């Protein structure tokens, strides 16, 4: 995915970060137009509304289908906004392209399914579509599956391509509706630095009050935009009502966010960064010394025919270090991950010493 282009639309002024807003579902023409006009008046230039809704169980509101495309066309004509909707099948892609939809997004249940992704990609390729496409993360935290879904769309000739982080399903009760495992989109960014990544705080949080804090967190982490559900009357929404906010509340949220500039580095920041570089070097030196001692221990164990792994010693190291780390203001979970990685490398080094005998 070497030639990814920014998400932009001819004749529409798109600001950064990219803000996409609109209802979870298009319900009526009046609801779609009322919401869109208010969002547009507040400076939003990309409108979203689902017309084919993937529902967990049968019997829920499954979307208005094709007639909703006419309402989106009206939004485009009357406000000049770019319009977007979710597609999951070949028929959806064809209908959306025929209606001149500017941006298609692929939902989390669909991006988890390679057959569905290939069907969508084939429909886009067949139509020689020049449309922007955003691929939500699959419901399960599988980065390779997400990348595979993006690659299928890229291989279909789509260059205005981006990813949406909407969190991952988890069993049981949690603060979030879908857990944000930030290291997954961060790893996606590391692998494909030019791919725009947008955060969906509505589906991560599942609650109105989490939309603002999650949006800020995403901006602080350098996400390229936000897709937020907004409905003119959220309490009466036919889907996802707990997480939708009115255009007025959305405007308030967007105005209170702190937008950070990735390129603005200051003198004092570079001094702080030098400190970090120095400390990292010290950390590496200490770790390498620790490994040397591990190898000496390995030699001793080998000479005395002792096994490498000694579980009781490992547990006591873990518990005492985690406690000290917590007293120093670090999280216990963080220290457990660090220590178990160090331990794994120590064991590997000791096994190398053991194997020396065999050479
Ligand atoms: C949506 O955007 O309304 C939607 C169905 O999202 P997701 O695929 O993230 O559940
Ligand atoms: Mn929704």
Image: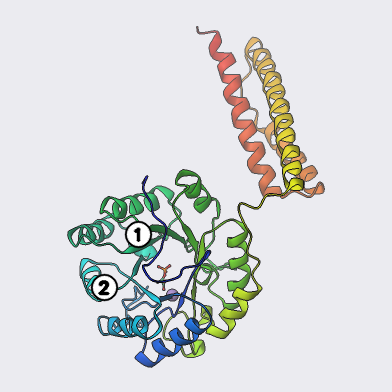
Circle 2: is it few (<14), some (14-19), or many (20+) Cα within 10 Å?
many
* Residue 137 location (% of width, % of height): 42, 59
Residue 167 in view, yes or no: no
Is the distance from the Cβ of mark 2 to the nearest ligand 1 atom less than 8 Å? no
In the rendered image, the residue lying farthest to the right is: 327
The residue that disc 1 covers is 111
**Location of residue 29 (image quadrant):** bottom left
In the rendered image, the residue lying farthest to the bottom is: 30
Observer-side mark, 2 or 1, equals 2
The residue that disc 2 covers is 96
Left or right: 71 in relation to 245: left
Spatial CA span between label 2 and label 1: 18 Å
Query: Looking at the image, is 219 positioned above or below residue 21?
Result: above
Is the distance from the Cβ of mark 1 to the nearest ligand 1 atom less than 8 Å? yes
* Residue 178 location (% of width, % of height): 51, 65
Residue 97 in view, yes or no: yes
* Residue 359 location (% of width, % of height): 50, 6
Name the image colouring: rainbow
């Amino acid at each position: 995915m070497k030639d990814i282009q920014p998400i932009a639309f001819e004749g529409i002024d798109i600001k950064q970060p990219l803000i996409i807003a609109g209802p979870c579902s298009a319900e009526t023409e009046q609801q779609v137009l009322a919401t869109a006009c208010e969002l547009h008046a507040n400076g939003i230039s990309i409108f979203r509304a689902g017309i084919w809704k993937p529902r967990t169980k049968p019997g829920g509101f499954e979307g208005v289908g094709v007639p909703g495309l006419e309402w989106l066309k009206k939004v485009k004509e009357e406000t000049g906004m770019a319009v977007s909707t979710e597609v999951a099948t070949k028929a959806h892609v064809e209908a959306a392209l025929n209606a001149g939809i500017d941006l298609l997004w692929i939902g989390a249940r669909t991006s988890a399914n390679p057959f569905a992704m290939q069907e969508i990609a084939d429909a886009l390729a067949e139509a020689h579509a020049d449309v922007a496409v955003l691929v939500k993360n699959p419901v399960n935290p599988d980065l390779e599956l997400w990348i595979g879904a993006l690659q299928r769309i890229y291989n279909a000739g789509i260059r205005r391509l981006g990813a949406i982080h909407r969190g991952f399903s988890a069993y049981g009760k949690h603060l979030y509706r879908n857990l944000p495992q930030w290291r997954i989109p961060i790893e996606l960014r590391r692998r494909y630095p030019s791919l725009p990544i947008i955060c969906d705080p509505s589906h991560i949080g599942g609650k109105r009050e989490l939309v603002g804090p999650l949006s800020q967190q995403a901006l602080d982490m350098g996400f390229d935009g936000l897709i937020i559900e907004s409905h003119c009357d959220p309490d009466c929404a036919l889907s996802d009502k707990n997480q939708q906010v009115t255009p007025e509340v959305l405007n308030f949220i967007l105005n209170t966010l702190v937008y950070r500039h990735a390129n603005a580095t200051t003198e004092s920041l570079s001094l702080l960064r030098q400190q970090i570089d120095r400390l990292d070097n010290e950390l590496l030196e200490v770790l390498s010394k620790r490994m040397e001692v591990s190898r000496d221990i390995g030699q001793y164990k080998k000479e005395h025919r002792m096994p490498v792994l000694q579980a009781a010693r490992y547990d006591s190291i873990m518990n005492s270090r985690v406690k000290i780390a917590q007293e120093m203001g670090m999280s216990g979970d963080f220290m457990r991950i660090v220590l178990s990685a160090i331990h794994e490398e120590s064991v590997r080094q000791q096994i190398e010493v053991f194997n020396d005998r065999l050479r």
